[in-house]
Amino acid sequence: MTRPREASSTGSSPQSPWKVLALLLPAVLSGSCSSDSTGNGPQPETPPGRSCESAAALPVALDLKATTLPLEVIGPPGTRVEAHIMLEATDVQAAKSAGTAGLWLRVHNILAPGSAEVSLNDAPFVDLAEAAYGLVRPHDGDVAAGVLPVDPRALRAGDNRLVFRYTRQVEDIAGISGFRVLGAALVAGTARDGKRITLALPEEDPPGWRPTDSSAEAIERGRRAFQELSRDGGPACARCHADSGADLQYYAFSTHSLVQRARFHQFSQCEAEDLASYIRSLPLLPKGRAVAPPFQPGPGNHGAAGAGVDAVLAQDSDFARAAWGGDALPESLSWDWAAGVNTYQLPTSVALPTWHRWLPRELKDDWFTRLDGILARTEAELARNPTLESAQAFMSAALLVGKDVLLREGDYQGKVEVLRFAAVKLWDWSRRTGFDRADHGMPDLSPAYPYEVGFAFFEAAQAQALPGAERQTLAWWWAQLATYPGRGFSTGRRPLNSKDVLAAAEAAGLEPSQLAFLHLFGSWEESRGELMQRWGTSDGPVRLLLVPMRGIPASARVTLMQRFLKQETEFLAAGGTLDSSHHARLAEAWGFGCEALSVAQRAAVRALAPPEVHGDLLGCP
């Protein structure tokens, strides 16, 4: 496959055709050319004269002993990681008395049956992707937790040996290299009431990681391997990542994972170690984690790291308490209530995409040559001159190329990958702009790159072209909501189209409190600035009533309708007018939602309606 000669954002010759992606996965133990893998703390330099096998030598399955969390079962198929949980005799007896026991696991990146397994005390391996366990996430590999049933007779007083195995190669357009175990516990008794005895291992310490070989020669070899070389006919690593590899350091992809992923792409062991040493040498502290979604909103959110896996809420009621301090929407809310909401800090039950779901699964030569090479030219300009204008031009180019891919080939996945590619490069632009700024590296009018990836999934969902697209749409759009939701610069279409956001949320099965919130925030945002001129049309906030009016409890419908009608009254009192399309939208929303209301609730809503819209509320007399 040939590589086009377009400009590269690394300043070197481009490394285009690109069917297999570099370095998808994350963190654990460090490898060495001449010895078994060791811990991932500060490492001594590799001694001179090491023996390096040919790049063509195939990597072999690894047998590793866990020393830290998360466990990373990463490597060639057959790779195993061993861990141990100690049980007291009383715990074993409690399980036998209850007649039940279990193995609780929290995992990441289990995508398909027959690929991830566990054995307890040398029993036959069990497939972790059995649907009943709730651990498999076929479309996104997100963090999941569940309990596997265990025969109490299999438990032992003292040491209980767990072996996790990556059983077969999984293809997700590009190949996947394993999975992670974030936590494990044996449960003595029922999953709800039994005692949990956890796997007692310390967490990894990414800030303490050091290059395997810190010599200038090794670092330069690693830089060249990352930015310039390919061993399998695919792109150089830098094409799908930040040009420098900063993303891999920022999100704490471990030395072990970097080495194993490079080996997957046919680099030799020594080349892979040099590449990992280069990443470890970058002047950037690890802030996020490979398993933690970037920008995940919550009180601990910082930079682009997100608030962590634990910030993802378990229930809609948790969101209600975080958003308005109670289990139900208040009876009355002002129109500008949302002005006091910090979407970067407000947690949600929506898990945003982890970093390996940002990375493109493939890059094709012709994406960089079609439309007169606009994508390659604007990418190169962004690298040379990282201004807001350059970022906007690059985003526009990616949208044009993605649209062309979809129109010419009907390739929904291809458009997603074009936009993922752009999102990674723009993430790095935001990083250089400053993630720690108040605007999170996304200044006013900056490209809405999380939204654009989400919109590519949204189109695919509407066409039923990609499985799981509805859920991925919402995850990407909530990332946009958390970082740059508009700030009064909304066009009604970018950086978020709240009508589409609500449609995606409904399709993804989002719970009522969060549906109500999306209406409250979106209607406020889309009535600011010049958008207020659209109020009296079907393109104003009236278009955001339909989804909540058919998806939230009756009392909350009353709150939202009364809030809207109060603002409608103010608009009309100021001389505004309503066109026929506005009336039609209001009547439609009322018709879908009024049947759930009591006679008294309907009357309470109508009492606040200005005379101009009385005819729109005739449904449900």
Image (spheres, grey):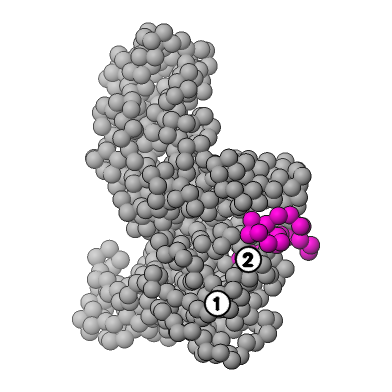
Nearer-N-terminus badge (1/2): 1
Cβ–Cβ under 8 Å for marks 1 and 2: no
Q: Is residue 145 left or right of residue 26?
A: left
Q: Specify the segment rendered in magenta.
A: 1-22
Residue 254: image x %, image y %? 47, 72
Which residue in the rendered view is the most extreme toward the right?
Answer: 2
Position of the N terminus by quadrant: bottom right
* SS at badge 2: helix
Residue 63: image x %, image y %? 49, 85
Q: Amino acid at mark 1?
A: Ala
- Measure the alpha-carbon separation of dots 1 and 2: 16 Å
Towards the viewer: 335 or 230: 230
Q: Amino acid at mark 2?
A: Gln
Which residue in the rendered view is the most extreme toward the left?
Answer: 90
The answer to whether residue 318 is above or below residue 578 is below
Instruction: Give the quadrant of residue 84.
Output: bottom left
Towards the viewer: 594 or 434: 434
The answer to whether residue 291 is above or below residue 614 is below
Q: Main secondary structure of the magenta part?
A: loop
Towards the viewer: 458 or 17: 17
Q: Is residue 217 left or right of residue 528?
A: right
Instruction: Determine the residue positioned at 63% across, 80% down.
Output: 268
User: In this rendering, does residue 16 appear at all?
Assistant: yes
Q: Which residue is mark 1?
A: 216
* SS at badge 1: helix
Position of the C terminus by quadrant: top left
User: In this rendering, does residue 550 appear at all?
Assistant: no
